[in-house]
Amino acid sequence: MKIALVGIGKIAVDQHVPAIAASDDWELAATVSRHGSVEGVEAFDDFDAMLAARSDIRVVSLCLPPVPRFEYAAKAIRAGRHVMLEKPPGATLAECHMLERMAHAHGVSIYATWHSREADKVSAAKKWLSDKTLNSLHVTWKEDVRRWHPGQEWVWEPGGMGVFDPGINALSIVTEILPDDVHLKSAYLDIPSNKQTPIGAALEFVHPTGAAVTADFDWRQTGDQIWMIEAVTEQGTLTLTDGGARILIDGIEDAVQSENPLHGEYPNLYAKMARLVTNGGVDMDLRPMVHVSDALALGRRTAVEPFYE
Ligand code: NAP
């Protein structure tokens, strides 16, 4: 199937282009970007022009930041194209619900992707937790924003989500592996005095059996980067670390290791999109986004020192 990639920035170059190139399902037939392009692929700098000129391309993958994404997705759906959305699927929940309704009305597929759910050991964690009694779960997601988001001013603007841009990856894993749904109880947000979005967040959730479910997100981490989820159960402790690439039960690591455990994430997303388009359907799990939205609604804000890159 021919696919167009829209927004040729960091994630498109790092992950989408190689995943499409490695797939038998997809042919990268066009790009749409004001500054970026991919060698050997027809490049447009205007989305309407691409939609008009390339009726043979039935699928578009949107790699833009969340705020501009709705307009592009809505245009694509109205033009009868199937749509794949980078995470988070929109800047607001209302936008995401609208896109879902539009996809149904136009008979096209839409896929809200959550790449971290495709990390190597997430499905093993889900399986292990499925029959355990949870006492507590804690997320530690601490990384250096200067290292992972150089020059990306949009993350600090309204809709850019700040530390929830990586934090929503952790929440996508938590909502996938926990057998029970949780909802947000309280949040504390550290917001640099010169920015609009949090650089740190501490979350507390309500779990139906009373288990303590909490998360700490921080973008001020230097040195070792930590992407870890620890679940303490009556039957033992699960540690999912390195963003879902490694799993330990009671401190003992799973003996079966992939050679490059994070590299299946984007190939898996594109394989899922191929199945969705072939079989017809909509996949819009908005639970990670609901938690972020609730944290921004309920969060108690503290102004912290200004952030300069
Ligand atoms: P990015 O490099 O800053 O932006 C991607 C591209 O979107 C830009 O190169 C730009 O291309 C286009 N763009 C930016 N603002 C726009 C606007 N207002 N209107 C139209 N086009 C605009 O961002 P990214 O890191 O690739 O992230 C994009 C999405 O992927 C985000 O939702 C992010 O959460 C997700 N993601 C990122 C990473 C990562 O490691 N960076 C990992 C996983 C997921 P042109 O200027 O050429 O049009």
Image (cartoon, grey):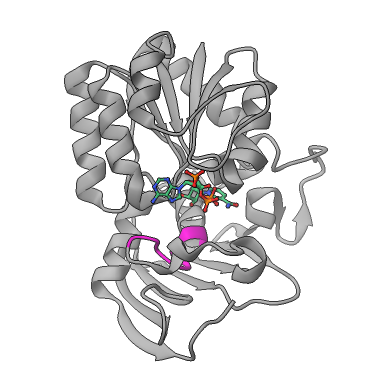
Front residue of 208 and 194: 194
Residue 161 sits inside the magenta stretch: yes
The answer to whether residue 1 is left or right of residue 81 is right
Front residue of 18 and 223: 18
The answer to whether residue 223 is left or right of residue 178 is right
Q: Position of residue 82 (x, y in %)?
A: 36, 21
In which quarter of the view is residue 146 placed?
bottom right
Vertical placement of residue 303 versus 199, above or below: below
The answer to whether residue 264 is left or right of residue 197 is right
Q: Position of residue 184 (x, y in %)?
A: 31, 66
Q: Position of residue 118 (x, y in %)?
A: 58, 38
Q: Residue at x 70, y 22 (%)?
A: 22
Task: Please identify the quadrant where the C terminus is shown.
Answer: bottom right
Q: Residue at x 18, y 31 (%)?
A: 101
Q: Which residues are magenta?
A: 159-166
Q: Position of residue 177 (x, y in %)?
A: 49, 47
Vertical placement of residue 111 versus 114, above or below: above
